[in-house]
Amino acid sequence: MKLSPFLIFAWLCLRTTTHATTARDSLRPGEMLNNSSILTSAQKKFSLKFATIEIPNTSLNTYLVIDRANTTGNVDWIGNRNDPLAYNSCALTLNHSGALIITRHNGDSIVLYSPAEATNRTIATLLDSGNFVLKEIDGNGSTKNVLWQSFDHPEFVLLPGMKLGVNKKSGMSWLVKASISRAKPASGSFTLEWEPREGQLVIKRQGQVYWASGLLRNKRFEHIPEEVQLMYEYNIVSNEEEESFSYTTPNGVSQWVLFHNGQLKDTTRGSEIARADTCYGYNTDGGCQRWEQPTCRKKSDQRDMKKSIRVHFAAAVASLVIVITSIGIFYIILRRRKSALKDNTTRTENKMLKLVALDRYAVSKHHCEVKKRSDSRVFSYASIIAMTNRFSVENKLGEGGFGLVYKGKLPTGEDVAIKRLSKGSRQGVIEFKNELNLISQLQHMNVIQILGCCIHGEERMLIYEYMANKSLDFFLFDRTRKMLLDWKRRFNIIEGIAQGLLYLHKYSRLKVVHRDLKASNILLDENMNPKISDFGTARIFSPQESEINTERIVGTYGYMSPEYVTRGIFSIKSDVYSFGVLILEIVSGGRTNSFYSGERQCNLIGHAWELWQQGKGLELVDPTIRDSCIEDQALRCIHVGLLCAEDNAVDRPTISDIINMLTSEYAPFPLPRRPAFYSRRMPNEECRCTKGSECYSVNGLSISNVVAR
Ligand code: ACK
């Protein structure tokens, strides 16, 4: 079956073709569906099949789809929207272990479902509601369990009976994700979600609410046209198991499609439900939401904010005590009752998961505007095992001080990175919860996005969006790979990090100081755009707080500001210092901790300052990019880098000043002073270098627990 891309949303429109085999509605263990067969629901309302779309400038792409049977209908569900298959090479198989898998010739399989324990008593049936359900059955063929269903994984369509909201037992969120464009069905940036606390539907773009339905009054939502709603009956469930929204129609025929531009339409009637595409951030008509003003930072809110932050830290400490107690209890039970290992593990996990949820709730309750993000979810251990191919070596992406990072694939085909914190990791329970709670509230294109977490016994895992080009240091400090970072890319990376920092320091709902900004914590996406990652040691500041004094110094030598290393004082200006070092590294292609400069001891800042003083700043520029380098921009970056690395925190620019200086040719620049660590080592830094050879710091890694002096 081949689809034309030239109709409006061509990939939504299918023509049924004759299939060779007799129609059936189910797959049994060992059976498969290939691109010459079809499943049809009992009353022939829906069908499940492989369909091919011709996307301009690409090859034919094949998708597993559910659509209306025997009509020129619309696609209601796609099993592999982010991972198209090659034409003629795919099959959907229910194997003898109970796994539902899309297999392809010469490629990875897409696992829709894989059971924790193998079972051969299964059946996968396409129902007349459009739901494709995998069930475990008993000897009589009666249903024991629903293992997986397509209705739990809505794509861009909400059908009658499909849910939006959250399944509290599994932690799974139900939301609809628009496509990326007219021509491509891959996931885009708009989502349709149910906000249980407010009791309204919302359309978000990258986490930002663009449109809200308003409250339900007399069974109708405030901001959906009355005449459009006449045929809908809404079902809202709020109990211990779930918070959900679904709808029905008298004849069961309806299809809410969330389009790539944020429009929500019932395509079976041609009626418009919501127009997030006309929400510009300043208008409030038709349910549009204002978002351009950061409301948390108003002066009048500051007292509440401070109070809320105190409560949130207090909550974190209380949670920690409970977590430790729970783990202790769990350990004793474990030793006494080895046979009950499995049950106990599950119970303890649930306790920890509850604590994580409680923390997030505490934050949302006390910070205005900060809501529990329903799109960050709790993953089951079984799903992590399936996603990472049992943590196989092939899936390993790399290793950090906290443990290993693996590549995984969601059942939807989306790639993810899974940080598996080792038991003895420096990232303990506090840092784990800190990172989870903190990043799940951040949403910026230059800040890594967290998708969820998994707790299994003593193991803790964080699941992030996958960054195709790994970390900046993977490229910057490698003799061959650094050539891929030409000047334009390097400048774009500097600008991106600056934007991410501006968001953290000023425009996010929390004021965040990262504390461990360095090249290995900057990840690069497929287009080499940077994202700040690793928030294990980040700290939230209240709006009034300008600096914090700590005894527990965490960070990386070479990137840490003098006042932080020597007195344990950190602030947004300590991030600015690290950013200055990072700018000099990006421009020079050399590591701050392995810099050799003639007779001098190791210090990239000192070397840069000396060249700058002598009017030879351009000599700092990495020789591999001298051809592509825009001299004026490079000099501006070096100048800004030196200002950021000023000894006194007050003399360093803020991140807004930095952005002005980087982007405006005419911005006034103060002159940088001679750095204090110009020709001597940072305290505690054991720096070894010999003339003519590369020198390095043995303290190039992140450190913690250094007693302040
Ligand atoms: O530079 P790398 O090869 O890329 O080494 C590190 C390693 O894991 C330990 O942090 C890689 N890594 C970390 N997070 C991600 C991610 N979200 N996507 C892709 N790779 C990642 C990183």
Image (cartoon, grey):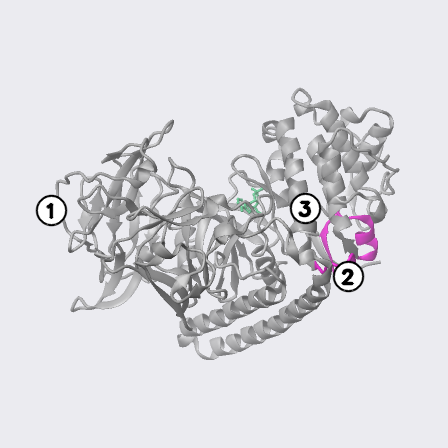
Q: Is residue 354 left or right of residue 694?
A: left
Q: Is residue 574 left or right of residue 137?
A: right
How far apart are the alpha carbons under marks 1 and 3? Answer: 60 Å
Extent of the magenta region: 541-568
Quarter of the rendering occupied by the N terminus: top left
Residue that appears at 87% across and 42% down: 676
Image quarter for ligand 1 equals: top right
Instruction: Give the residue type at disc 2.
Output: Thr
Q: Are marks 1 and 2 in contact (CB under 8 Å)?
A: no
Secondary structure, mark 3, is: helix
Q: Which residue is mark 2?
A: 550
Callout 2 environment at 10 Å: few (<14), some (14 to 19), or many (20+)? some
Q: Which residue is mark 3?
A: 501
Instruction: Give the residue type at disc 3.
Output: Leu
Circle count: 3
Q: Is residue 685 left or right of residue 220?
A: right
Q: Position of residue 444 (x, y in %)?
A: 59, 47
Mark before the other along the chain sequence, 2 or 3: 3
Callout 1 environment at 10 Å: few (<14), some (14 to 19), or many (20+)? few
Q: Position of residue 665 (x, y in %)?
A: 75, 28
Residue that appears at 83% across and 28% down: 611
How far apart are the alpha carbons under marks 2 and 3? Answer: 22 Å
**Image height check: is 487 above or below 395?**
above
